[in-house]
Amino acid sequence: MGRFHRHDDGTVHEHDHPHEAGDHTGYRTAAHRVDVLESIFAENDARADINRRVFADHGIRVLNLMSSPGSGKTTVLAATLDELAGELAVGVIEGDIATDLDAAQLRGRGAQVSLLNTSSGFGGECHLDAPMVNRALQGLDLSGLDLVIIENVGNLVCPAEFDVGEHAKAMVYSVTEGEDKPLKYPVMFRSVDLVLLNKIDLVPYLDADVDRYVAHVREVNPHATVLPVSARTGAGMADWFGWLRAFAGGG
């Protein structure tokens, strides 16, 4: 006799097969899920290579900027565009699940901005992948750009897993998030070349130890550049601007 399973809608079905240990769904999908994921990543990597060729053809350097929601990524980017206006021709791919709030904050600062909402035709994805970035490039005049900054969707997990054709990855990590985040989300922190430790102006109010934050980053990624900054007050931002100028120049 099979096992009965009650669904959330109150209906009951009989399953003729036993559940696997730890499996309470009644479905055996592991092998298929692996095949699907492999296909997704293969397609993504192929499109990332196309993006790379496009960037190379136009002599553009590309930075993938990631963070969790509320880290201050858009504030950092707004200050960056103000600093580089008239010096470097910058394009921004603004990724968000919904709304144009962040894109609106960046417009009028001397950069081209291409908005990409993942809720519009992408199923509300929590990250940008290479095909999405390729589509967003249609909103930029690449022939006139020196640097493209991809402001990825706020998430400390998914964005790190997708190559989008960038030359480097960076992330904004706020002291308000707690010092344990590099240990809890090591894949993200391991993937980046630079970490901006933001909101250091709040350290006195949080009883936070900046050295401890940096040590935890170093524990999972000993090679990343770590720059303590405050996008609000400007503290430490000169180091970030210098790093970005060198990056844009191919350094």
Image: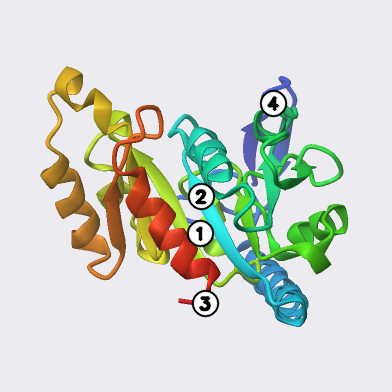
The dot on residue 160 is: 1
Dot 4 or dot 2: first in sequence order is 2
Q: Amino acid at mark 2?
A: Met
Between 41 and 55, the one nearer to me in the picture? 55
Front position among marks 4 and 1? 4
Q: Quadrant location of the C terminus?
A: bottom left
Describe the element under mark 3 as helix, strand or loop. loop
How would you rate the neighbour count of disc 1 (Cα within 10 Å): few for under 14, some for 14-19, many for 20 or more?
A: many
Between 130 and 90, the one nearer to me in the picture? 90
Task: Answer above or below: position of 123 versus 188.
Answer: above
Between 173 and 229, the one nearer to me in the picture? 229
Residue 61 in view, yes or no: yes
The dot on residue 66 is: 2
Q: Amino acid at mark 3?
A: Gly
For marks 4 and 3, give the CA distance: 31 Å
For marks 3 and 1, give the CA distance: 22 Å
Front position among marks 4 and 3? 3
Q: Residue drawn 70% across and 73% down?
A: 48
Q: Are marks 2 and 1 in contact (CB under 8 Å)?
A: yes
How would you rate the neighbour count of disc 4 (Cα within 10 Å): few for under 14, some for 14-19, many for 20 or more?
A: few
Q: Are marks 4 and 2 in contact (CB under 8 Å)?
A: no
Front position among marks 2 and 3? 3
Q: Residue drawn 74% across and 79% down?
A: 46
Between 41 and 114, the one nearer to me in the picture? 114
The location of residue 35, given as percent across then percent down, is 68, 73
Describe the element under mark 2 as helix, strand or loop. strand
Dot 3 or dot 1: first in sequence order is 1
Q: Are marks 3 and 1 in contact (CB under 8 Å)?
A: no
Dot 4 or dot 1: first in sequence order is 4
